Image (spheres, rainbow, N blue to C red):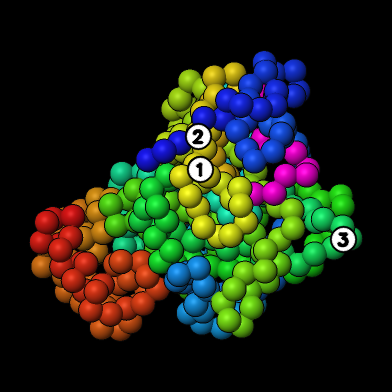
Amino acid sequence: MKAKNLCVYAGLCAGVASIAVGQSQDQTLQQIGPAAQLEPIQIAKVAMKDGKVVFQGDWMPYNGGNTRADGVRIFYCFGDADSDRFMDDMGGCGLGSSRWFFGTGFANLFVTNDMVVVSDTDIGAGSHSVDFAWYFTCSGASSETCVVAIFTQESEPCDADTFDYSGWLLDFGTLTCNPGGYYYTNVDLTTGSWPLPTDGAGSYVIIYAQEVTTSGAFIMSTLAQPMLWGTGDAGGAPDMVGSQGVNQFDEVVVDLSHTSSECFTYSFTSICPSVLGAMMQFWGQRGGTGCYADFNGDGQVNTQDFLAYLGAWAAGDLAADCNDDGQINTQDFLCFLGLWAAGC
């Protein structure tokens, strides 16, 4: 695992002590706020295979509204201490809803950051809701379409991407830009979910695009980047839900392929939070063991879990996609059998 330290470039604005950021060009890590809320127009369940998008269903109109009222947070790098799905001042950073980013001219269109969900997460239930924030503008245009892909996968930065992961495309339609803006969204799925890493530790992937072609290729956005926050403040917030490390993959060369030179360390001592990452908050179910083999979420791994999994697998339920490749087949059955036999 090779990480590139962020200590090579520009100083921090807003009166905070000077720090450095290691990106492909000189940029200043700075604050912006407040955010504007957006809702997607339509969504689609997809998988990513060998750099191509494979649709798992048709585009569906997004009607909003979470029908899973018992959902709880299982991971956040968002700053939402009161669970109202809006950025607040978690951990006493004193920034309100303001968040960090690399300035209006910076593009980071393909991001992978690690996550470890809270230990009692019901892994089999997946995540049915996400909250995230990004900065969006365009290059040489007054408007541009915006599609954001959110995936989950087993590997962690800065390990190699698997390029076999599942998630959703979120189509926000045409957005005005130049100037652009800092946006956040709360997305609830009335059916389906984001699969969670089988041992609770993996990563989330964000791609900013204008559209996805019929051949499954992304036409990338011209200027977009994730807003940055962390799972805790400089002292370690006591209300943290889940955790993450210090590394993040950023897209320096826009080719949808991360290399070791695109692994950056987002650890600082002079800002709050002291470890930054692409803003993301996952909601799901808790009360399980944090173990995928506990498929029915009763805190035990036994025959009942095997039967519950077998039923989901036979029905083609995406919750049975043990290897997270977007398909339900024999490989998933063998994946689950191995975890079940090991007790996790």
The reply to whether dot 1 and dot 2 touch (C-beta < 8 Å) is yes
Res 183 seen here = no
At 49% from the left and 61% from the top, the residue drawn is 151
At 50% from the left and 34% from the top, the residue drawn is 4
Q: Is residue 31 above or below residue 203?
A: above
The answer for how far apart the CA atoms under marks 1 and 2 are is 7 Å
Res 150 seen here = yes
User: Residue 2, located in which quarter of the rendered image?
Assistant: top left
What residue does disc 3 label?
Answer: 141
Where is residue 107? Give x, y as percent: 69, 49
Q: Decide: few, some or many residues near mark 3? Use Cα within 10 Å; few <14, some 14-19, many ≥20.
A: few
What residue does disc 1 label?
Answer: 261
Q: Which amino acid type is marked by label 3?
A: Ala
Where is residue 101? Give x, y as percent: 68, 38
Nearer mark to the viewer, of 1 and 3: 1
Q: Is residue 197 magenta?
A: no
Q: Earlier in the sequence, mark 1 or mark 3?
A: 3
Q: Earlier in the sequence, mark 2 or mark 3?
A: 2
The range drawn in magenta is 94-108
What residue does disc 2 label?
Answer: 4
Numbered disc 3: secondary structure: loop
Nearer mark to the viewer, of 2 and 3: 2
Where is residue 170? Give x, y as percent: 62, 67
Residue 325 placement, left or right of 32: left
